[in-house]
Amino acid sequence: MTPARPTFSPLSPAGLAPIGLGLAASLALVLAVAGCSGAPPQQAGPTQVGVITLAAQPLTLSNELTGRTSAVAIADVRPQVDGVIRDRLFAEGSLVRAGQPLYQIDARLYKASLDTAAAQLESAQATLADADAKAKRYRALPDPQAVSAQDMDDTLATARTARASVHQYSATVETARVNLEYTRVLAPITGRIGRSTYTKGALVSASQTTALATITQLDPIYVDITQSAAEWLRLRQALAKGSILPTSTSATLKLEDGTTYGRPGSIEFTEVAVDESAGTVTLRARFPNPDGLLLPGMFVRVATPQGNLPRAILAPQQGITRDAKGNATALVVNRAGKVEQRNVVADRAIGTSWLVTSGLAAGDQLIVEGTSKVHAGDPVHATQVKLGQ
């Protein structure tokens, strides 16, 4: 018969003894290891960040404004005499030159009026010549009493009347000649002529309100652009203080499809009044348009220079952050190798950079990589980086 094996209850002193001995041995081993190491936990080194060293550089400030093209000159072609149109002498939509004949009005009545006035002038001239000759003969007589004083006075009066008639009919001849010239309607300016509103055989008059056609001068062409009055005022004040230097008046034009117009223009003038409803100032630019690519009424954008900054600070956009209120801040590495937060003024984007007018200076090391891993006062290890590579 096999002897009965002793049983142990986990709660009995005999059952707890093996477990307690095992826990004590493990705790002693952990304390021994900790006591042998003796060194504090190892701390991480300074955070690696990428920086660029800011440098001052000359910069021309420019602004891109919207505008619309407008013709330099527009002239309505109107008749200056009454009559029937005998012929149209131009092709609609063609380029016409100043002084080029456009319409021919029936000139027969005006030619007859000129001939009549010329005949009247000849008659007055003959009367004047006869009166002058008679007065000359009377004065040449050896006996002054041979002709009565009354006859002499009548002859001189006739000469004066004939001379006045000559002047009168000379003016009549000139008027008739001008009216005859007006029967040939000429282009008042050089430009592109539109459609003709009257055809051959139509009766026209000098008092009509409808133009025969309209000529638009397209070369050069104006572009009327608008700028915020507040922005224009800030620019003028900066120029007055000398913080911005004057620049040229050249301008570059972008078409509605985004392409750049190949010929540069220039700013002609600025309006002397502000549009009260929009709060804007109108500027007028002038562009050459020999090919007629620009037509009046086109929507365009014009890049205009505003001024020159001799020592501008440009900060990459990834180095500038903004808070909920839109205030701009930047993180720089100071001489102690620690992060320093700066409040900056950066209200103009230049390409992929911000133009910083306050808060940063040449020589500052601006953090552009790793900004999310550091805070003000943290020691960092700065490494120069080249953006865009």
Image (cartoon, helix red, strand yellow):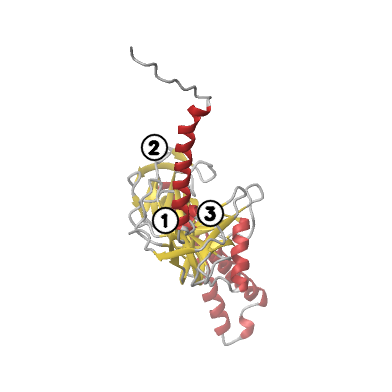
Furthest residue toward top: 1
The amino acid at mark 3 is Thr
- In the foreground, 359 or 288: 359
Question: How far is mark 3 from mark 2, CA to CA?
Answer: 75 Å
In the displayed structure image, the side of residue 1 where residue 75 appears, left or right? right
Q: Residue at x 65, y 47 (%)?
A: 277
Q: Find residue 180 and report its horizontal and vertical position in percent.
A: 43, 53
- In the foreground, 150 or 218: 218
Vertical comparison of 155 with 221: above or below: below
The amino acid at mark 2 is Gly
Vertical comparison of 154 with 182: above or below: below
Q: Is residue 119 visible?
A: no
In terms of sequence position, does the residue under pointer 2 or pointer 1 come before the other?
2
> Residue tagged by mark 3?
321
Secondary structure state at the residue bearing disc 3: strand
Q: In which quarter of the view is residue 6 placed?
A: top left
In terms of sequence position, does the residue under pointer 3 or pointer 2 come before the other?
2
Residue 201's label in the rendered image is 2
- In the foreground, 199 or 171: 199
Secondary structure state at the residue bearing disc 1: strand
Residue 253's label in the rendered image is 1
